[in-house]
C-alpha cells in the first residue's frame, strides 16, 4: 500500500524537477541569444562600458577620496580656485574639491535614480498587468488614473509634493516614482492585452488556471523584456528629475548630489565669477550618465524588437 502511494508521488516530483530543469535551460538559451543580439549593437556596448565605469567610480568613491573632504570645516583650498595639481577640478566657494564632490555626488544621484525607477516600474507593472488582465471597472479606473498622471506636468507636481512633504532622500524617491509610473502602466497594459489573445493563455483558462497563475506564469514573463527596456529609459529621466529638483533647492540639503552642486554653484555666483570648473563636472556627469542609459535602452529595444534590427 505504501509503495503504491509513494510511487506516483515520486513520479510527480521527478516530473516537476524535469520541468524546472527544462525551464532553466530555456532561460539560459534565451539569455544567450539576447546577449549575442545586444553585443551586435555597437552603441549599446559603448553605453554599457560607460555605465559600468560610472558605477565602478561611484562604488569606489570612498576608496578613491576620503569622505572628510566633503566637510566644510576641513576644507583646505581657496574660494573657487581653478584646476591645479592639488585640485584637478578646482574648488567650490568653501574650498572643497570639486572632484570629491562630483565623485561622491554620483552615489546619491545614481541611488535616487535607480531606486525611484524600481519603485515606479513595480507600481506601473503591477497596475498594467492587473488592469489589462482583469479589465472591467477596475481596468477602466486604473486607465483613467494613469492618463491623469500622464497629462500632469511632472516637474511641477514634484515641486508641489516636495514643498508639502519636505526635503529628504526618501521623499525625493517617492515623488519621482509617483510622477513616473504611468508611462510604464500604459506600455505594460498594451502588451498584456496582446498576450491575452494568444492561444496558450486560452488553453490555460480552459484547464482552470486562475487569475494569479495566468498573470505570474504566462503574462508577466512575456512583458518583462519590455519592462526592462522601459526601465533603462526611465532611469535617466529619474536622474534628470532629481538633478532638476536639487538644482531648484528642493533636494536634501544634508547630502551631496550633482544637482545640489549645481545649485550651490548658481547661488554662489559661479557664472558671474567665470568658475566653469564648478559647473562643468557635475553637468557633464549628468549628460554622460543619461547618454549611457539611453544608449543601453535603445539597444535593448532593438534586441527585444527584431524589426528594429532589420530582421523580418
Image (spheres, rainbow, N blue to C red):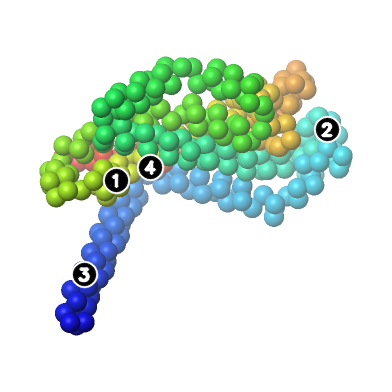
**Residue, x 80% and y 47% (percent of image)?**
68
Q: Closest to the observer: 289 or 142?
A: 142
Q: Find numbered disc 4 in the image and state the secondary structure of the residue it sits on.
A: helix
Q: Work out whether residue 105 can be spotted.
A: yes
Q: Work out whether residue 221 can be spotted.
A: no
Q: Are marks 4 and 2 in contact (CB under 8 Å)?
A: no
Residue at the disc numbered 4: 228
Residue at the disc numbered 2: 94
Left of 199 or right of it: where is 67? right
**Residue, x 54% and y 19% (percent of image)?**
157
Distance in Å between CA atoms under marks 1 and 3 = 23 Å
- Density class for disc 2 (Cα within 10 Å; few <14, some 14-19, many ≥20) is some
Residue at the disc numbered 1: 212
Residue at the disc numbered 3: 12
Q: Are marks 2 and 1 in contact (CB under 8 Å)?
A: no
Q: Closest to the observer: 280 or 255?
A: 255
Q: Earlier in the sequence, mark 4 or mark 1?
A: 1
**Residue, x 86% and y 34% (percent of image)?**
78
Amino acid at each position: 500500500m505504501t509503495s503504491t502511494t509513494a510511487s506516483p508521488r515520486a513520479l510527480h516530483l521527478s516530473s516537476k524537477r524535469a520541468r524546472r530543469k527544462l525551464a532553466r535551460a530555456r532561460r539560459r538559451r534565451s539569455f544567450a541569444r539576447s546577449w549575442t543580439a545586444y553585443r551586435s549593437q555597437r552603441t549599446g556596448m559603448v553605453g554599457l562600458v560607460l555605465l559600468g565605469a560610472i558605477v565602478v567610480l561611484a562604488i569606489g568613491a570612498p576608496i578613491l577620496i576620503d569622505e572628510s573632504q566633503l566637510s566644510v570645516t576641513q576644507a583646505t583650498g581657496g574660494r573657487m580656485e581653478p584646476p591645479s595639481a592639488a585640485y584637478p577640478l578646482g574648488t567650490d566657494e568653501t574650498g572643497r574639491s570639486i572632484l570629491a564632490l562630483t565623485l561622491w555626488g554620483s552615489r546619491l544621484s545614481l541611488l535616487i535614480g535607480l531606486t525611484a525607477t524600481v519603485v515606479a516600474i513595480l507600481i506601473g507593472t503591477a497596475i498594467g498587468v492587473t488592469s489589462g488582465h482583469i479589465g472591467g471597472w477596475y481596468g477602466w479606473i486604473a486607465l483613467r488614473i494613469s492618463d491623469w498622471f500622464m497629462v500632469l506636468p511632472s516637474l511641477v507636481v514634484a515641486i508641489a509634493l516636495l514643498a508639502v512633504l519636505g526635503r529628504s532622500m526618501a521623499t525625493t524617491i517617492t515623488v519621482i516614482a509617483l510622477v513616473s509610473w504611468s508611462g510604464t502602466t500604459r506600455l505594460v497594459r498594451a502588451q498584456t492585452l496582446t498576450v491575452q489573445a494568444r492561444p496558450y493563455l486560452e488553453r490555460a483558462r480552459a484547464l482552470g488556471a486562475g487569475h494569479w497563475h495566468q498573470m505570474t506564469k504566462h503574462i508577466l514573463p512575456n512583458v518583462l523584456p519590455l519592462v526592462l527596456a522601459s526601465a533603462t529609459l526611465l532611469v535617466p529621466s529619474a536622474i534628470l528629475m532629481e538633478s532638476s529638483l536639487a538644482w531648484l533647492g528642493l533636494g536634501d540639503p544634508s547630502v551631496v548630489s550633482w544637482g545640489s552642486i549645481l545649485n550651490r554653484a548658481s547661488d554662489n555666483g559661479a557664472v558671474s565669477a567665470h568658475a566653469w570648473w564648478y559647473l562643468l563636472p557635475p553637468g557633464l556627469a549628468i549628460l554622460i550618465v543619461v547618454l549611457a542609459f539611453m544608449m543601453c535602452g535603445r539597444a535593448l529595444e532593438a534586441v527585444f524588437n527584431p524589426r528594429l534590427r532589420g530582421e523580418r
